Image (cartoon, rainbow, N blue to C red):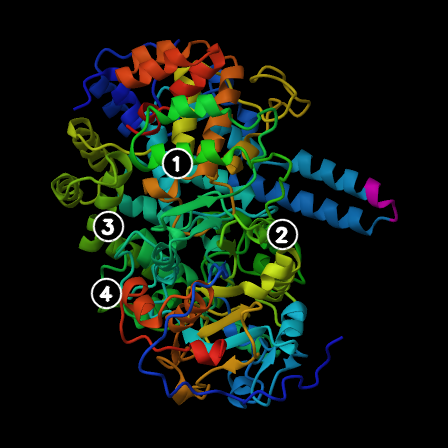
């Protein structure tokens, strides 16, 4: 059992990012798995991973700090609902990136969600996702656990999605029927009917649960197979808590519990493949440092990213902590993001797919200024 | 150019049922729908919608309150958990309103004779998204769709915008009910007692970004904050409506300030409002409720709103690859008519009829069209009946209309993001989406469809390629499914 003691003694309090190598390097082909958990609505990073050693936290926030965070180091704690994740931190298979964000300060959900999926600076500028382009460059396949195919993995050579049907009295469509329907379509619709017809062999109607936890179980089972997908995308919605967000208990903490069980479930169902996997969260923006008038927080900027998986060798909290004094805040209201989260995504791609950092920032994120954080997370 | 009446009726409406009288002058038929309010056709298309299935806002809140009171009582009763569950379910079923609303939505979509009007209702219901919740907001979403939106499409955009923003569903969904001015009497007294209160900018931000000018207009965080200050004091949480009027101990204590009837007409609480002047986009607003009306007018008349919404309408009714020239035609009328919705909708029709651009239909638009053109009835998702014949004890048909909407991922009563459902084809093309289409086509076949796949292909002018696929299918059901899932029916 975990308690409030500091269990990550070896870890430096806050690691500033510096000393980047000039060149990346190409490793031998790596057979890693990437699972992205999209936290839709904007996760409150200060509630999830409170900087308990920063006195300004308690000056800025009156209600929205959990009463009993698990202490990670002198500066950071983690919300007590992250039990599985804390265990992973303790066993050196999880890391936290704090004061981070995709490069977006506009506070619109929809622009922010778009940027967190396309990975470029300008919202709605392309129709492909950063993970899709990474898969494209690494020539691998993926799968999304949702009714639609999320933008994040579009652009990949091959991708598929999964979301169990629950229309009673209907069965899996027949192959010859699918071929006939396919022949009436062109382009992506035609390809999609073809893909549906090919996936029927493995398809099954038995599995109908669609909550994130069940989908995580399904994702882990599928990715464990040698011919299974190497990428999965899960969504946990409803982080947009403008009111009654909750501190120790409440809606945001309940979502932390759910997210935490998804981490736990993924580890459980991936089994030995966990050792070769990296799970990372994304969110469109953080939330305001101060509470609003209704015990919630409004749209902000910097937040936190949670990473777990066997590809991590040493747990750490990676942050270039900007502080929470009024002066330190972005536009006097938000946590400053001092780490471009795309550098974290790039490190995950490098670790799981073995692509060269320079190639990732050029082809995937199209921004050569993105720094290499690989050694901070996977080094 | 849509010269075939059947195809045209699908481009901008839901198509014709086999038993429908096809109008002689189809353009006149469309234009007549523009000034009309929701007709709310009767069950199975017979007569008018039953009066006992219409609920005023006041009755909706009363029913919710009755349900919550009974639920609370049963929860504290000393009875077995099974008995508790049973009694709570009875209380819920007796006081339901949202299922009636969902029936009305289905019924209008598959039986009404004003399908362009219905498509407009769906478009605006999506533009002004109010996401559902299991127990509370679902009591008012149907009112927003059918009364507020369906009843106000013949007037100005400004008028519609004002009614939607002040609808209890919108004020609740985007958290305005939680907001109170920093300097308001309410916030001061709450803070004195050690409680949190103050502004919440959620609705303010989305009015600008989604409902009116969009991010193309470069407004600032200060504008958002000032709009939040103008909005403070408007609205009351749906779940507390009746409680606050019936309970003297309530922190809002509303009955001291106003009556329920007055509050429904004008949901404004002065003691939560922010005193003093506000400034939005360079314009100054005095304190008091009229600031909101002036602000809404100003935003409705903004050039960026005309641009944003002309484009949105064009994409919805013409297609995502609509040309700038086509959008401009709608925009010009928006400007010259000062945002008169019937003029704007009329020019949208004109542009849509002449276009060569195709639109990939929303799953529900496709499904309602399929049900109509094949002469089918409601599709049930339980093995209880085929179609819509049997009536339950509560007067509703044996049919669960929400789960099918969830299955195809397009449900106006679902909990979802305020930007509404996507207009992009790529968001609706996936193996899972297509799997659902096939399953639903199969259910429609069994829901008393009256015409065959070959007949549909003939009437709606399908290509030879598709006709060949239909004729190659082995069974009558397969032929029907190929016709319904063909590119011609998914995209027009």
Residue B93 vs A282, above or below: the answer is above
Residue B492 location, quadrant: top left
Which residue appears at 36% of the width and 84% of the height? Answer: A20
- What residue did someone put label 4 on? B218
Mark 4 and mark 3 lie on one chain; the one further toward the N terminus is 4
Find residue B380 and report its horizontal and vertical position in percent: 57, 24
Asked whether B60 or A189 is in front, the reply is: A189
Find residue A118 and report its horizontal and vertical position in percent: 34, 59
As helix, strand or loop, the secondary structure at mark 1 comes to helix
Instruction: Say yes or no: labels 1 and 4 on the same chain.
Output: no
Using the image, tell me which numbered label, if any, was put on residue B308: 3
- What residue did someone put label 2 on? A217
Q: Chain of mark 2?
A: A
Which residue appears at 57% of the width and 80% of the height? Answer: A62
- What residue did someone put label 1 on? A192
Badge 1: how crowded within 10 Å, few (<14), some, or many (20+)?
many
Segment tinted magenta in the rendering: B78-83
Using residue B343 as the reference point, say whether residue A232 is left or right of it. Answer: right
């Amino acid at each position: 059992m975990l308690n409030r003691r500091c269990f990550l003694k070896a870890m430096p309090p806050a690691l500033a990012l510096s000393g980047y190598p000039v060149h990346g390097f190409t490793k031998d082909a790596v057979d890693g798995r990437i699972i992205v958990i999209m936290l839709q609505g904007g996760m409150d990073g200060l509630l999830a991973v409170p900087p308990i050693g920063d006195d300004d936290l308690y000056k800025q926030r009156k209600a929205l700090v959990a009463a009993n965070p698990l202490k990670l180091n002198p500066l950071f704690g983690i919300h007590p609902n992250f039990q599985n994740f804390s265990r992973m931190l303790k066993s050196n298979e999880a890391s936290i990136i704090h004061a981070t964000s995709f490069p977006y300060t506009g506070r619109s959900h929809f622009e922010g969600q778009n940027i967190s999926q396309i990975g470029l600076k300008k919202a709605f500028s392309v129709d492909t996702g950063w993970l899709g382009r990474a898969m494209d460059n690494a020539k691998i396949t993926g799968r999304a656990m949702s009714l639609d195919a999320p933008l994040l993995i579009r652009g990949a050579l091959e991708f598929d999605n999964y979301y169990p049907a629950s229309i009673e009295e209907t069965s899996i469509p027949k192959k010859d029927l699918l071929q006939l329907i396919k022949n009436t379509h062109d382009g992506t619709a035609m390809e999609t009917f073809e893909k549906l017809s090919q996936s029927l062999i493995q398809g099954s109607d038995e599995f109908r649960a669609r909550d994130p936890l069940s989908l995580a179980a399904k994702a882990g089972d599928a990715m464990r197979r040698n011919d299974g997908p190497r990428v999965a995308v899960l969504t946990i919605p409803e982080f947009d808590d403008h009111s009654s967000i909750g501190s120790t208990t409440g809606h945001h903490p309940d979502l932390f519990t759910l997210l935490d069980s998804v981490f736990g479930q993924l580890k459980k169902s991936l089994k030995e493949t966990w050792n070769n996997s990296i799970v990372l969260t994304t969110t469109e923006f953080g939330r305001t440092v101060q509470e609003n008038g209704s015990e919630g927080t409004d749209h902000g900027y910097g937040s936190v990213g949670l990473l777990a998986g066997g590809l991590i060798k040493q747990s750490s909290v990676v942050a270039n902590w900007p502080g929470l004094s009024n002066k330190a805040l972005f536009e006097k209201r938000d946590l400053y993001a001092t780490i471009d989260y795309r550098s974290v995504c790039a490190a995950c791609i490098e670790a799981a797919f073995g692509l060269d950092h320079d190639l990732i920032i050029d082809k995937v994120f199209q921004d050569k200024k993105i720094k290499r954080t690989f050694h901070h997370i996977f080094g | 150019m849509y010269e075939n009446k059947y195809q045209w009726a699908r481009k901008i409406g839901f198509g014709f049922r086999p038993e429908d009288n096809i109008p002689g002058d189809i353009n006149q038929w469309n234009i007549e729908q523009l000034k009309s309010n929701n007709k709310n056709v009767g069950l199975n298309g017979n007569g008018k919608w039953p009066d006992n299935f219409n609920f005023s806002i006041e009755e909706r809140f009363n029913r919710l309150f009755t349900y919550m009171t009974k639920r609370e009582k049963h929860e504290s009763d000393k009875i077995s958990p099974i008995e508790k569950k049973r009694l709570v379910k009875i209380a819920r079923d007796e006081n339901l309103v949202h299922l009636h609303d969902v029936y009305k939505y289905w019924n209008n979509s598959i039986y009404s004779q004003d399908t362009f009007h219905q498509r407009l209702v769906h478009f605006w219901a999506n533009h002004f998204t109010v996401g559902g919740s299991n127990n509370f907001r679902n009591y008012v979403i149907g009112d927003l769709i059918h009364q507020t939106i369906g009843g106000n499409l013949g007037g100005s955009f400004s008028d519609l915008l004002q009614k939607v923003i002040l609808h209890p569903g919108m004020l609740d969904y985007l958290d305005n009910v939680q907001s109170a001015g920093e300097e308001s009497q309410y916030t001061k007294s709450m803070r004195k007692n050690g409680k949190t209160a103050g502004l919440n900018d959620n609705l303010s931000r989305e009015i600008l970004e989604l409902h009116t000018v969009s991010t193309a207009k470069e407004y600032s965080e200060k504008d958002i904050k000032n709009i939040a200050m103008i909005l403070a004091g408007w609205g009351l949480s749906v779940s507390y409506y009746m409680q606050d009027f019936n309970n003297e101990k309530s922190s809002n204590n509303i009955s001291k300030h106003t009556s329920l009837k007055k509050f429904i007409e004008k949901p404004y609480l002065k003691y939560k409002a922010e005193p003093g002047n506000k400034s939005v986009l360079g314009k100054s607003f005095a304190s008091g409720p009229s600031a909101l009306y002036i602000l809404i007018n100003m935003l409705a008349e903004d050039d960026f709103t005309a641009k944003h919404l002309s484009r949105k309408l064009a994409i919805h009714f013409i297609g995502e690859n609509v040309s700038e020239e086509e959008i401009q035609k709608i925009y010009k009328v928006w400007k010259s008519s000062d945002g008169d919705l019937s003029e704007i909708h009329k020019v949208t029709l004109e542009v849509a009829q002449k276009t060569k651009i195709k639109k990939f239909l929303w799953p529900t638009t496709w499904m309602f069209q399929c049900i109509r053109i094949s002469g089918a009835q409601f599709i049930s998702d339980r093995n209880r009946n085929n179609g819509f014949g049997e009536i339950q004890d509560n007067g509703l048909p044996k049919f669960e209309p929400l789960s099918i909407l969830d299955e195809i991922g397009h449900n106006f009563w679902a909990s979802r993001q305020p930007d509404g459902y996507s207009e992009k084809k790529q968001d609706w093309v996936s193996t899972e989406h297509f799997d659902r289409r096939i399953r639903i086509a199969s259910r429609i076949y069994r829901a008393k469809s009256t015409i065959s796949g070959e007949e549909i292909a003939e009437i709606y002018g399908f290509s030879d390629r598709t006709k060949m696929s239909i004729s190659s299918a082995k069974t009558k059901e397969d032929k029907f499914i190929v016709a319904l899932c063909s590119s011609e029916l998914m995209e027009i």
